[in-house]
Image (cartoon, rainbow, N blue to C red):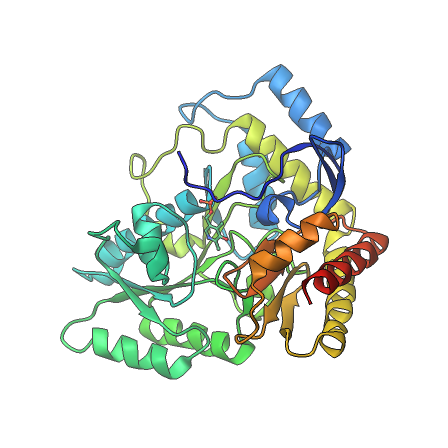
């Protein structure tokens, strides 16, 4: 179906941070499958794990115990504030699980008859019906109504709006059950959460006994330079979701929570493919490689290098670049609103210069390379983006 407006490019091979098209042209991949190929392409450890696992046992069903699933859950619990994990196959599916768990918690623990989950404007939580409803962007919802009831929206990083919205919703009867936010809004334009805002969000959730859920699908698994985006904000959520980078490009999703809010019982939720031996073995290798190869430190250092280089652009191209922002290896270049140049224009020009980038909305270019990216590759990308901008002006 014609659901994708594709760039005129066919990729056939990859190694590390490089990919090649069907004509043999080489590109530096600063998209990484949209923040997914954590270890780049054809990483030897991932190749070995996936090859060995598919030769041994790749899928069995959750009717049985799966050692790789237990090992991955143990690693994730030991490296996060969560106590429990449910595995699925994508970000949207992980968020669906979080929404279901929050609703069951609301009904069975909080005694809320009509639970509402508050989400942010300009957020992105996936493409299923519940997650496009959670997504505070009308363009993803248009013509798909009726949407799922039980969501309300607030301005991101705006504490007054959050307090007013909760007060309004709870006026007649208690309704608000949870707040679902991204630590940094990815698709919505690479907009980092503000430290003070999130401190207050955590306090509000504690005061009201409601759940704080983080969508870490894009920023989790080391992308921010911390393993989880919420560490950058100095707070712990009650639940959070992961997917994109978790198995480095093998499909997987995870919904994690603290034990107090794990109200699921056998039969409440399930997934045929979720947590199969292949995906879990791949994810465990990604986790161990992030740790063993010090990829968090690399994400921090390479991210600083990239932002410093991008911040030199405004001097050369006054009137084009408004702001450079991000954490670790998720960074955005905001284009001035009145510039005729759009993010897709820059992405297309960069393709010609051998650099793959991805828009995050019409006026933001996103840089999300693999976490293994080298200092030389950051310099090459900066040179390519400068060449690309020069062709547009
Ligand atoms: C990509 C993304 C999703 C959706 O993930 P899928 O695997 O495409 O379903 C959800 N939330 C955030 C923050 C994302 O970036």
Q: Farthest right residue?
A: 376
Residue sitting nearer the eye, 383 or 72: 383
Q: Farthest left residue?
A: 172
Q: Is residue 129 left or right of residue 21?
A: left
Instruction: Tell me: residue 239, above or below residue 91.
Output: below
x and y, in percent, of residue 76 in the image: 57, 47
x and y, in percent, of residue 241 in the image: 47, 51
**Residue 367 appears in view:** no
Q: Farthest bottom residue?
A: 160
x and y, in percent, of residue 171 in the image: 18, 78
- Count of numbered circles on the image: 0
Residue at 20% x, 70% y is 174
Instruction: Tell me: residue 66, above or below residue 235.
Output: above
Instruction: Tell me: residue 54, above or below residue 197.
Output: above
Which of the 4 quarters of the picture holds residue 392?
A: bottom right
Q: Is residue 76 left or right of residue 96?
A: right
**Residue 28 appears in view:** yes
x and y, in percent, of residue 271 in the image: 38, 33
Q: Which quadrant would the N terminus be assigned to in this image?
A: top left
Residue sitting nearer the eye, 351 or 365: 351
Instruction: Tell me: residue 370, above or below residue 136.
Output: above
Q: Which quadrant would the C terminus be assigned to in this image?
A: bottom right
Residue at 55% x, 48% y is 77
Residue sitting nearer the eye, 303 or 113: 303
């Amino acid at each position: 179906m014609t659901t994708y407006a594709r760039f005129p490019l066919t990729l056939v091979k990859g190694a590390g941070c490089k990919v090649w098209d069907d004509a043999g042209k080489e590109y530096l991949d600063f998209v990484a499958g949209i923040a997914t190929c954590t270890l780049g392409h054809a990483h030897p450890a991932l190749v070995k794990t996936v090859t060995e696992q598919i030769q041994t046992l790749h899928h069995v069903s959750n009717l049985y115990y799966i050692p790789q699933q237990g090992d991955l859950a143990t690693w994730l619990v030991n490296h996060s504030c969560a106590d429990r994990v449910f595995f699925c196959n994508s970000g949207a599916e992980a968020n669906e699980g979080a929404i279901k768990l929050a609703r069951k918690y609301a009904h069975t623990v909080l005694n809320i008859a009509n639970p509402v989950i508050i989400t942010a404007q300009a957020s992105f939580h996936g493409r299923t019906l519940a997650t496009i409803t959670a997504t505070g962007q009308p363009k993803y919802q248009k013509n798909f109504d009726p949407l799922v009831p039980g969501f309300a929206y607030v301005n991101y990083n705006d504490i007054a709006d959050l307090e007013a919205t909760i007060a309004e919703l709870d006026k007649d009867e208690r309704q608000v059950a949870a707040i679902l936010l991204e630590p940094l809004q990815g698709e919505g334009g690479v907009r980092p959460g503000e430290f003070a805002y999130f401190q207050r969000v955590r306090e509000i959730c504690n005061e009201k006994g409601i759940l704080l859920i983080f969508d870490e699908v894009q920023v989790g698994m080391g992308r921010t330079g911390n393993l989880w985006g919420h560490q950058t904000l100095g707070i712990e959520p009650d639940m959070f979701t992961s997917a994109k980078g978790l198995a480095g490009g093998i499909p997987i999703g995870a919904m994690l929570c603290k034990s107090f809010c794990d109200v699921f019982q056998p039969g409440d939720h399930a997934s045929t493919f979720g947590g199969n031996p292949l995906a879990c073995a791949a994810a465990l290798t990604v986790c161990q490689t992030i740790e063993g190869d010090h990829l968090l430190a690399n994400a921090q250092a390479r991210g600083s290098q990239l932002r410093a280089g991008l911040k030199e652009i405004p001097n050369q191209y006054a009137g084009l670049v408004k702001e450079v922002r991000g954490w670790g290896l998720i960074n955005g270049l905001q284009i001035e609103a009145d510039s005729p140049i759009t993010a897709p224009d820059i992405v297309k020009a960069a393709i010609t210069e051998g650099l793959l980038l991805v828009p995050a909305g019409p006026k933001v270019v996103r840089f999300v390379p693999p976490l293994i990216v080298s200092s030389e590759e950051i310099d090459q990308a900066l040179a390519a983006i400068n060449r690309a901008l020069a062709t547009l002006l």
